[in-house]
Image: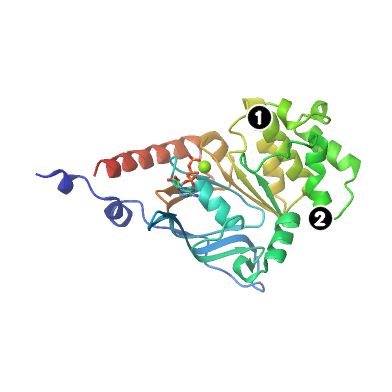
Amino acid sequence: MSTESVIPSLEDMITTHSWTRLTVHCEDTTADSPGYVPALISASNVTKSYKAGSRSIEILHGISLSVRAGEMCAVMGPSGSGKSTLLYCLSGLEQPSTGEVRLLEQATDKLSRTALAKMRRSDVGFVFQSYNLVPSLTAWENVALPIRLRGKRPERFVIDQALESVGLTKLAASRPAVMSGGEQQRIALARVLAQQPRIIFADEPTGALDTRSGDMVLQQLRSIAHHPERCVLTVTHDPQVAARCDRVLFLRDGYLVRELAAPSADQVASTLTELAVDTDMADRS
Ligand SMILES: Nc1ncnc2c1ncn2[C@@H]1O[C@H](COP(=O)(O)OP(=O)(O)OP(=O)(O)O)[C@@H](O)[C@H]1O
Ligand SMILES: [Mg+2]
């Protein structure tokens, strides 16, 4: 028997395996339905392609999802499955190639560049390792920056409290160059805490942290997400972190393939193992 006939192709597995292409939480009730909770982030059939020479490579394939107010959701999946790309597209940092992204119930491609920038400054917070701190500013000034960019004067106690809540009061006057990666990441979180945005996108927010600092960050993110007018969408590789989220979405090779509601860390870990096994099989086919 030839190898091709035993090992299914990726497309076969997506359509015939237990992994089906998912659309999560997109059945929208209307604003006047009882118990209506708005989706603060939603994606409808989003694709993202990059040019490689004369070819175009599709990284995200028709992603549809929504994250409602009061929710903390995790995105998981093997390295290279498109998690960061998805976060960039959902957050308006990158334009999807096709499909629609809505933030706070507004289609981002219908907003002017200025209106989108304004929404990002006031209502959207990022904890991305690659969108980090301004090197020439102190930790305190970095935390105050989004408020200044909104044309407001930062209140001292708000910034002090944000630094205290990530345990880094002692670094208020330090510049990023003298901080560890984990400390920089906690300052980036303090910046978001001071900004109080309605939506937070976080890419591996606890990746560079020890268990105690990671717990502190997670606790902060959870308390923001569980506010009735806010939500958090975070990428993580850590089943323990995912298990503290309300929902976990799994990406594989740019497809949204699975969703677990309030899973245990064991359930998350075994889903990741299944995904990795399938990815290995696809690589060998
Ligand atoms: N600007 C770009 N141009 C071309 N390809 C890109 C670009 N950005 C990302 N990719 C490709 O898209 C795929 C998904 O990348 P992405 O960074 O979203 O993965 P990820 O799931 O976040 O991985 P990791 O867990 O390692 O952070 C990868 O194959 C990557 O090489
Ligand atoms: Mg990534």
Where in the figure is residue 21, as x and y percent of width and height? 39, 57
Q: Quadrant of the N terminus?
A: top left
Q: Please report the residue visible at 51 percent of the width from the left and 50 percent of the height from the top.
A: 85
Residue 261 appears in view: no
Please report contact status of discs 1 and 2: CB closer than 8 Å, yes or no: no
Question: Viewer-proximal residue, 161 or 112?
Answer: 112
Read off the residue under disc 1: 182
Q: Residue at x 38, y 58 (%)?
A: 54
Q: Is residue 13 left or right of residue 257?
A: left
Mark 2 crowd level (few <14, some 14–19, many ≥20, 10 Å Cα): few
- Across and down, in percent, residue 269 comes to 45, 36
Amino acid found under the numbered disc labelled 2: Arg
Q: First in sequence, mark 1 or 2: give its number.
A: 2
SS at badge 2: loop
94 left or right of 19 in image: right
The front one of 198 and 173 is: 173
Mark 1 near ligand 1 (CB under 8 Å)? no
Is residue 161 shown to the viewer in this render?
A: yes
Total numbered labels placed on residues in the image: 2
* Residue behind mark 2: 150
Q: Residue at x 82, y 36 (%)?
A: 140
| Amino acid of disc 1 | Gly
Residue extending farthest to the front is 53
Position of 281 with respect to 41 (left or right) is left
